[in-house]
Image (cartoon, grey):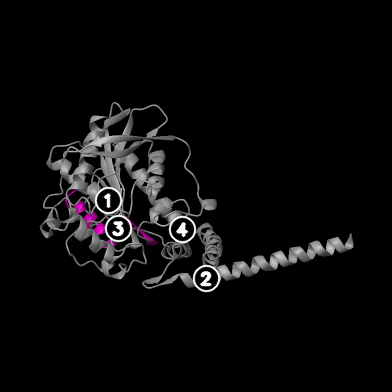
C-alpha cells in the first residue's frame, strides 16, 4: 500500500511538472507571437493571427478550436431560397428564421470575402449571420451574390439590391415586417450594404431603418489612408495584394471606381442613407476609410455610431465565439440593429465634432487565460503537422 501511495505521489508530481512546463512553454511562445510587424498585440489576437497565418485552423475559415466554441441557442431555423435577379438569373440565399411567431423585423446581410471567388461565402460567415439572427430576433436574408472574376461590377451590387427588394416583397411570406428593414455586412459585404442603401434611396426602393457596416471597404479609389499602408502586408488577414486583386477583378474598369456603388465614401450624395453603425479594428487596413465614411455620414446629418475596437485585426468578429472583443463587436451590431429596427435610435445630434468611440484593446483575464490554452493547442497541432 505504501509503495502504491508513493507511485501515486510520483505520478502526480510528474503530471504537475509536465503541466507547469507546458504552461511555461505556451506562455513563452504566446508572448513571442505578440510582437508583430506593426507593434505588440494582445495575447488572444496573437494566437489567432498565428493560427490563421500558419494554417493551423481550417483553411478559408476563421474558426475557433471546437472545444472552445460556444454554439448559439436553437432559436433559429435555416432554409434555402432562390432570388431572381434583373439579368434573369437566380441566385441562392439563406434565410435565418426565428422559431417564434412573427411578424419579425428583417435584416439583409451581405457576407465578406473581397468580392472574389474562394475568399468568403455563406458557409464561412454562417456563425456571424446565425448569431446576429438569434441576438436581434430578426429574420436574416443572406444572398449568395455572384463573385469576381466570373462576374464583375455591377453584378454583385445588383444582386445585393435585388435581394433587398425580394425580402421586402416577400415579407408576408417570411412572417416579416417590411416596415422594419435593415442591411448589414462585413468587409466587402459592408461595401455592398452601403451601396445598396444608396441605390435604394436613388431608385425609390425599400425604406431602411438602419445599417451596420463591419470593417467596410469604403472606396475603390486609390485614396491614401495610413492604415492601408501600416497593416496591408496580409499578416492582419487582409493584404494589399488581395485588395488590388479585388480592384482588378471586381472593378477592372477604372471609371467604375468613382461610382457610388463601388465607393460609397466618394458618393456625391449620401443624404438618403439610414442611421448607421460603423465598426472598425485597430490593426485593419480598412480602418481609416471606414471611419472616414462614418464621419462623412455624420457631417451630412445622419445618425452615426462609430466604434473602433483596439487590439484586433480585420475580420475579428468572425472569432466572436472565442474572442471577447469579437463578441462585444457582434453584440454592439445586434443592439444597434434592434434599436434601429424598433425605431428607438435618438435623433442626430451633430452640434459636436465627430468622434470615434475607442473600445479598450486589453484582453480580459478570461481572454488571456484562453489565449494560453489555445497556444498549447496550436503547439501540439503544429507538432502533428511536422511529424505527418
Task: Classify mark 4: residues with Cα within 10 Å, few (<14), some (14-19) or many (20+).
Answer: some
User: What is the number of the mark on residue 190?
Assistant: 1
| Res. 208 visible in picture | no
The first of marks 2 and 1 along the sequence is 2
Give coordinates of residue 53: x percent, y percent.
41, 65
**Gap in angstroms between the C-alphas marked 4 and 2:** 17 Å
**Gap in angstroms between the C-alphas marked 3 and 2:** 34 Å
User: What is the number of the mark on residue 356?
Assistant: 3
Give the residues drawn in magenta, as a range: 287-312
Q: Is residue 189 above or below residue 203?
A: below
Q: Which residue is mark 4?
A: 57
Q: Which residue is mark 2?
A: 29
Task: Classify mark 1: residues with Cα within 10 Å, few (<14), some (14-19) or many (20+).
Answer: many
Q: Is residue 292 above or below residue 26?
A: above
Discs 3, 2 touching: Cβ within 8 Å: no
Q: Tell me the mark number nearer the camera, choosing from 4 and 1.
A: 4
Q: Tell me the mark number nearer the camera, choosing from 3 and 2.
A: 2
**Gap in angstroms between the C-alphas marked 1 and 3:** 18 Å
Left or right side of 96 for 387:
right
The first of marks 4 and 1 along the sequence is 4
Give coordinates of residue 166: x percent, y percent.
23, 34
Please tell me whether mark 1 sits on a helix, a strand or a loop: helix
Give coordinates of residue 228: x percent, y percent.
26, 66
Q: Tell me the mark number nearer the camera, choosing from 3 and 4.
A: 4
Left or right side of 11 for 156:
left
Discs 1, 3 touching: Cβ within 8 Å: no
**Gap in angstroms between the C-alphas marked 3 and 4:** 33 Å
The first of marks 4 and 2 along the sequence is 2
Q: Is residue 305 found inside the magenta-colored segment of the image?
A: yes
Amino acid at each position: 500500500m505504501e509503495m502504491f501511495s508513493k507511485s501515486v505521489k510520483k505520478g502526480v508530481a510528474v503530471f504537475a511538472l509536465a503541466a507547469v512546463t507546458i504552461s511555461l512553454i505556451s506562455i513563452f511562445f504566446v508572448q513571442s507571437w505578440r510582437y508583430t510587424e506593426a507593434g505588440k498585440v494582445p495575447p488572444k489576437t496573437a494566437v489567432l493571427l498565428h493560427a490563421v497565418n500558419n494554417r493551423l485552423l481550417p483553411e478559408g475559415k476563421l474558426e475557433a478550436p471546437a472545444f472552445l466554441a460556444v454554439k448559439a441557442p436553437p432559436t433559429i431555423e435555416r432554409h434555402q431560397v432562390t432570388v431572381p435577379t434583373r439579368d434573369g438569373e437566380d441566385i441562392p440565399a439563406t434565410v435565418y428564421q426565428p422559431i417564434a411567431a412573427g411578424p419579425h423585423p428583417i435584416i439583409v446581410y451581405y457576407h465578406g470575402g473581397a468580392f472574389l471567388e474562394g475568399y468568403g461565402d455563406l458557409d464561412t460567415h454562417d456563425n456571424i449571420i446565425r448569431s446576429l439572427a438569434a441576438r436581434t430576433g430578426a429574420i436574416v436574408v443572406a444572398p449568395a451574390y455572384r463573385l469576381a472574376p466570373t462576374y464583375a461590377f455591377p453584378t454583385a451590387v445588383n444582386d445585393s439590391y435585388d435581394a433587398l427588394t425580394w425580402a421586402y416583397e416577400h415579407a408576408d411570406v417570411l412572417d416579416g415586417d417590411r416596415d422594419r428593414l435593415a442591411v448589414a455586412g462585413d468587409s466587402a459585404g459592408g461595401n455592398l450594404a452601403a451601396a445598396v442603401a444608396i441605390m435604394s434611396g436613388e431608385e425609390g426602393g425599400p425604406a431602411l431603418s438602419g445599417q451596420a457596416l463591419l470593417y467596410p471597404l469604403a472606396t475603390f479609389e486609390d485614396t491614401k489612408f495610413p492604415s492601408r499602408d501600416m497593416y496591408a502586408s496580409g499578416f492582419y488577414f487582409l493584404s494589399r495584394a488581395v485588395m488590388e486583386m479585388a480592384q482588378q477583378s471586381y472593378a477592372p474598369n477604372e471609371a467604375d471606381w468613382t461610382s457610388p456603388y463601388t465607393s460609397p465614401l466618394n458618393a456625391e450624395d449620401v443624404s438618403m442613407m439610414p442611421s448607421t453603425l460603423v465598426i472598425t479594428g485597430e490593426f485593419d487596413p480598412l480602418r481609416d476609410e471606414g471611419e472616414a465614411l462614418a464621419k462623412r455620414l455624420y457631417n451630412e446629418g445622419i445618425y452615426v455610431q462609430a466604434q473602433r475596437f483596439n487590439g484586433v485585426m480585420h475580420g475579428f468578429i468572425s472569432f466572436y465565439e472565442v474572442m471577447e472583443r469579437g463578441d462585444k463587436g457582434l453584440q454592439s451590431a445586434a443592439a444597434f440593429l434592434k434599436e434601429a429596427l424598433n425605431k428607438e435610435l435618438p435623433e442626430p445630434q451633430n452640434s459636436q465634432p465627430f468622434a470615434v468611440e475607442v473600445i479598450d484593446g486589453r484582453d480580459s483575464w478570461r481572454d488571456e487565460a484562453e489565449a494560453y490554452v489555445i497556444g498549447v493547442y496550436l503547439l501540439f497541432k503544429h507538432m502533428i503537422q511536422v511529424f505527418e
